[in-house]
Amino acid sequence: MHSWTPRFCRGSFSEHHHTPRFTCNPGGSMHHWRTFLAALIVVACGDQMPPSAVGGSASMLANAQSELVPAVVFNTQMRSELEVPACASESKGHAQVKVLEDGTIEAAATISNKGGESVRFGHIHHLPPGQATGPIIWWLTTPVGVDLNLTEEHIDVQQQGVFVTNPHFATAELALAELLSDPSSFYVNFHSDVCPGGFARGFLP
């Protein structure tokens, strides 16, 4: 896991992405992702299978990974008006989440801290149907569990997602399978001292 050092700069917030986007490589990459997704599910359930089947599943996963070249990329705008409970903040941001061919999650977030928030940390959450909030699945800031208390006007975060124990997914493989099959049930959320439940939230498309 790469370490992360926050980078700050002064200036206005550039919003090149006005709407969330989902991009994938044309020419069959989504077929390979479906194969990879199926392999993840099989491997995640390996404890219910005989050893020979588990070995075959691992080979299937390796083959699927080798065929995956492009990353799956999600972009989302993070806004305070999407927060539950409500947060009256002028701070906002943009987040990009990449799923690499080996299943690694790489995230980059830019926050325009116009509201003067003391930013504590950021995560990817999973939102079950009918709920207003969901548990943390991946941390997007490190060290995990540490309040960073960043107060700069412009904050950039680049971090590999760190899977943590949660009530929705027993393993990172199961969480990744759900992310690829139903990305809109996940959201990026950054939290602050004033709005501990979150001041900038954006759903993946």
Image (tube, rainbow, N blue to C red):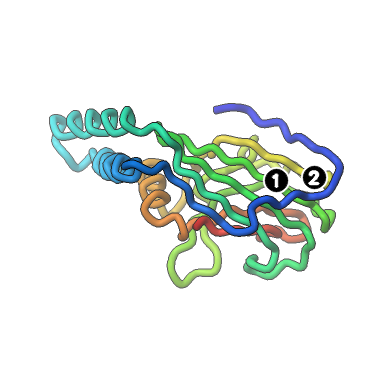
Are the two marked residues, 2 and 1, in contact with CB atoms closer than 8 angstroms?
yes
Residue 129: image tag: none
Q: Position of residue 201 (x, y in %)?
A: 63, 59
Q: Quadrant of residue 39?
A: top left
Q: Where is residue 113 in the image (x, y as percent from the top left)?
A: 79, 52
Amino acid type at image mark 1: Thr
Residue at image coords 79%, 62%: 90
Residue 154: image tag: 2
Image quadrant containing the N terminus: top right
Asked which secondary structure carries label 1, the reply is strand
Which residue lies under the disc numbered 1?
Answer: 110
Where is 1 relative to 33, above or below?
above
Q: Where is residue 79 in the image (x, y as percent from the top left)?
A: 68, 61
Residue at image coords 42%, 50%: 179
Residue at image coords 46%, 72%: 130
Residue 200 visible in the displayed image: yes
Where is 11 relative to 84, above or below?
above
Choose the circle earlier in sequence order: 2 or 1: 1
Asked which secondary structure carries label 2, the reply is strand
Amino acid type at image mark 2: His
Which of the two residues, 137 or 91, is positioned nearer the viewer here?
91
